[in-house]
Amino acid sequence: PKMDSDEDENFDTNFSDHEDEDTGEIQSKEMNIIFLLDCSEKMHKEMKFRDTKTGKEVSDTYFNRSLRAIFDLYRDRIRFTDRDMFGIILFNTNSNENSLQGVKVLSKLDKLNVERIKELKELLEQPQTDRKKCSSSTSGTNHLRFGLWCCMEEFQGSKKDASKEIYLLTCDSNPFPGSSKMENDCIQKAKDCLDNMTKIDVFPLRDALNGEGGSDNESGFKGVNFYRKLLELFFDSSPEVAEEIDYRLSERTLCELQSEIEKGISMRSFSTVNWFITSSFDGDGNLQRKPKNDLAVPVKVIHLCIASKNYKKSKEKSSRDNKDIVKTSRILSKETGEILMGSDIVRSIDVGPDRVIFTNEEVQRIRTMGLPKEIRSLGFMSKSLVEQRYNYKGSYFLIPNEKAGNGTTAVFHSFIEVMIKEDVASLCYIKLRENAEPKLAALLPQRASDVDDVPAGFHVVFLPFKGNIRKIPPHPQVCPDKVDEGLQNAASELVKSLNYESFPTSFENPHIVKWMTHLEAHALGVPSLRLVGLVG
């Protein structure tokens, strides 16, 4: 069933500001990820691990834990996106697919669906002996090089603007003992991946409790030149590179795989814009824009925290043929019943007995004030003037956009250091969409933080205009001296008993968790799973 419509998409029936910049929609390229999973005998050896949920020791294999981590990632990502593509390729197997010895495509690069998750679930439920049959102990063959070659073949069908990443999962800290030729061949294949705009990340498996793959491998991965050479291909030259590579080869665990991928997703910018730092005013206080004197710094705008709207919504379908119902509409004249086009419609506001008519073009010019899409500093002020209560919008964050201009990062960080030293914030107006209303904001500088994993940049604090500030209504005041001491002691005990030592950022949205739990149960054909509470 379909209802006809010819509504003009640009027509809006009121004068409200289009909050386009606050939708949280990520306007970025899709992600294509292949997990290149080691299938050697070491990966199938049973060892002791610490269960992250119960804290107890459990027997497991690196291969099982890797598949389980990928399975959990699939279950999570299918909730949020139908654009990204994932695949799994095994190397060091006894397979000879496509004339590539030791390589098997377990799951081709494709979008996630229920059937792919079911297949992976069934593989995890197989006896360990069945999974171990695919492993290979053959030495002297460069299975890893063939695996990288197979990954590049899978990426051939990717979109040109899609990001391509390979996650290498292995517990073998020394894959080419005494064979510099195989090592060099593999590095050359990694360079081919780099030329093909494909990134490789090594995820060493080293968290076993009984030595092998544990503390023994921690120093092993850091000390092997092969993995260091491999990662150095994908990092810019800087003093911090050695520390970053050490972290990737020694401190990450498999449970961080999902957060590592989500980190790249969450840091996608939803807008890119120029930040103009120079401006001046005339005698009447009007802003004078002088393009020749402007210092333009290209920046990316990202959300550090947005509302959770990333679960899949239900669609209406016809009960007769199960096809999607498309709803459209037309605007009709009240008097004649004729269909009205966008050019036939104007806007009006009643002022007393009179009606003031505006065209769409006039409304657009009034709302945008004729200003372009940009961030423009109006001056600098003390940070103490920016009170926390003034921030009435979402958490925006600015980072440099080096691709839009060489030297951007250096200029950007220079302003961060100077503004922190002078303890000032930048007062500016910000306009992130062409049809958006410019807003007043303060830019607060921040150095890179290892604690909360936030890069160096500027927090955007949207400031209210005079008409937006509300006064607190009169209310009875309580004198602290007149508060009952017993009541204070009871409140003190309650506060101490419910105290958090750190900020609780691990609370899941119970509505989304409950929704997705039931949806997953229906899709996989399993009994309804547990209901998760606020801190469940």
Image: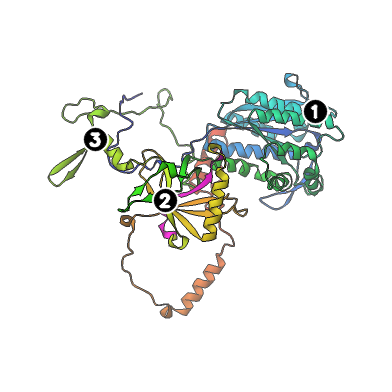
**Eye-nearest disc, 1 or 3:** 3
Q: Secondary structure at mark 3?
A: loop
Residue 290 appears in the picture as rendered = yes
Query: Mark 2 highlights which residue?
Result: 428
Name above or below for residue 239 compared with residue 492. above
What's the image's color scheme?
Answer: rainbow
Q: CA distance from mark 1 to mark 3?
A: 69 Å
Q: In screen coordinates, is 419 left or right of 186? A: left
Residue drawn at 65 percent across, 25 percent down = 154
> CA–CA distance between discs 3 and 2?
30 Å
Residue 134 makes an appearance in the image: no
Instruction: Provide the secondary structure element on which disc 1 rests.
Output: loop
Judge the density around disc 1: few (<14), some (14-19), many (≥20) Cα neighbours within 10 Å: many
Contact, mark 1 vs mark 3 (Cβ under 8 Å):
no
Measured from the top left, where is residue 211 in percent x and y?
82, 48
* Residue 399 in magenta stretch: yes
Residue that sits furthest to the right in the current view: 178
Identified by mark 3, the residue type is Thr
Which residue is tagged 1? 142
Q: Residue at x 67, y 31 (%)?
A: 194
* Residue at 66% across, 23% down: 153
Is 404 placed left or right of 197 in the picture? left
Q: Secondary structure at mark 2?
A: strand
The front one of 221 and 440 is 440
Residue bounds of the magenta highlight: 388-402
Q: Work out whether mark 1 precedes mark 3 in sequence or the reverse, and give the earlier one.
A: 1
According to the picture, the residue beneath numbered tag 3 turns out to be 359
Q: CA distance from mark 2 to mark 1?
A: 57 Å
Residue 400: percent from the left, percent from the top?
A: 54, 44
